[in-house]
Amino acid sequence: MAIDWKKEAERLSRYWWGPKAPGDYVVGRRSDSGQLQLAGPGLLATPLKGRPDYRSAWNLMLLAWGRYEPPTTLEHAQAMVHLLVVAHQTAGVLVQGHPLGTYTWLMPPEKFGQWVLTPSVAAVVGLQAGTLSRQCTRLVGAPV
């Protein structure tokens, strides 16, 4: 079996699953002052100096969201931001010395869903292992 190294390098150069980059998950709305307000998890997942790095939580947020579509309303954007903050806590759990969220950068969701159920990982992740695996199955079946 030949490995397409160019394709692998492209895949590993981005940290997100799915066809849309985090910057596509932003909603704009005009405020009373006429200024455009932006909201959404895509702003958090773009690392800036002096701000927590939410990149390792991005794929776990997509698992909880259950689909690849960006938010269409400000309420959906706020819900996704909440999911991203919760996913950030889960992503920080150390598995074999590395944050759980960074493992999603190395494997697609179907493999991550299987990997998280391995005994050594499930022992660290606990009850969330089954939930993460089920969410992976749901996300794999989601339309792109």
Image (cartoon, rainbow, N blue to C red):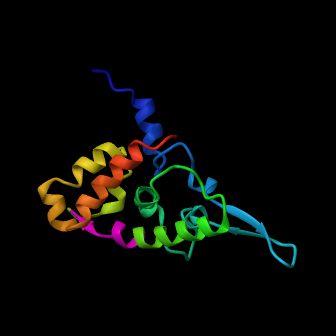
Q: Along the horizontal axis of the image, is 13 left or right of 128?
A: right
Check if residue 63 falls in the magenta segment.
Answer: no
For residue 88, which quarter of the picture? bottom left
Q: Residue at x 40, y 60 (%)?
A: 60
Which residues are drawn in magenta?
Answer: 88-95
Q: Position of residue 132 (x, y in %)?
A: 30, 58
Q: Nearer the viewer, residue 57 or 71?
A: 71
Check if residue 91 falls in the magenta segment.
Answer: yes
Q: Is residue 106 visible?
A: no
For residue 93, which quarter of the picture? bottom left
Q: Is residue 25 above or below residue 137?
A: below
Q: Position of residue 17 (x, y in %)?
A: 45, 47
Q: Residue at x 41, y 56 (%)?
A: 63
Q: Nearer the viewer, residue 25 or 5?
A: 25
For residue 56, which quarter of the picture? bottom left
Q: Is residue 61 visible?
A: yes
Q: Is residue 43 above or below residue 22?
A: below
